[in-house]
Image: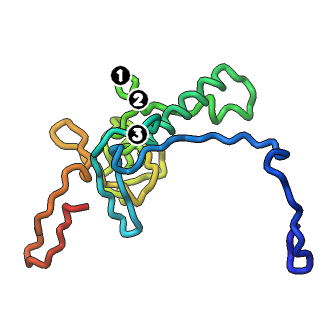
Amino acid sequence: KRTVKNPDVPTYTPADIQTEVFFLPAAAVYEKEGTAAQTGRWVQFRWKGADPVGESKADLWIYNELGKRIKKLYAGSTKPQDEPIVNLDWNYDDEHGHDDIMKVALELCGYNVADGTPVEGFAKLSDDGSTACGCWVYCGAMTYKDGKIIYKTQNRDNKDNSKTGLGLYSNWA
């Protein structure tokens, strides 16, 4: 242990350490669709601008595949310690078996458990099990209109919609 009184740190040779390293070739931000978020609660959707290079994959694809494969690995286990994985609800594929960014967004932004419609805002979240939300800060970023779930961040514009012309551009993010 390195401390002020004992500044000597043992030397290790990487070849002697039995560590397995996994390389996950994640695509660059412009090679995948998704959202960018920051501390001001802005969530901006970005569309894919180019195909990923080489074997690179979108983060969503990597996480979704890991989730599905881990569940498959533990399927049928009766060990109590495996129950969280065995009972994990991992349904982020579309009807063709591909990862579905809208399902992930709905899970993150919040929905009503009974009918799957988005929760209108964090004040509508409930602790009685009737709503679910991955991150309350993003609650309300999705809406339900004309029988369709809409991700508001995909419908942005650069118009100043303030009555005073102040330049708020509230539909930008």
Three-letter code for the amino acid on which mark 2 is drawn? Asp
Q: Secondary structure at mark 1?
A: loop
Q: Is residue 43 left or right of residue 66?
A: left
Task: Tell me the element at label 2.
Answer: loop
Q: Residue 30 at what x, y percent from top left?
A: 34, 49
Residue 35 at x, y percent in the picture: 35, 52
At 40% from the left and 24% from the top, the residue drawn is 97
In this rendering, the answer to whether 71 lies above or below 136 is: above
Going by the numbered disc 3, the residue's amino acid type is Val
Query: Is 10 positioned to the left or the right of 93 in the image?
Result: right
Residue corresponding to mark 3: 53
Q: Look at mark 1 in the image and give the residue it sits on.
A: 96
Residue at numbered disc 2: 93
Residue lying at 42% horizontally and 41% vertically, measured from the top left: 58
Between marks 3 and 1 in the image, the one whose residue lies nearer the viewer? 3
Answer whether labels 2 and 1 touch (C-beta < 8 Å). Answer: yes
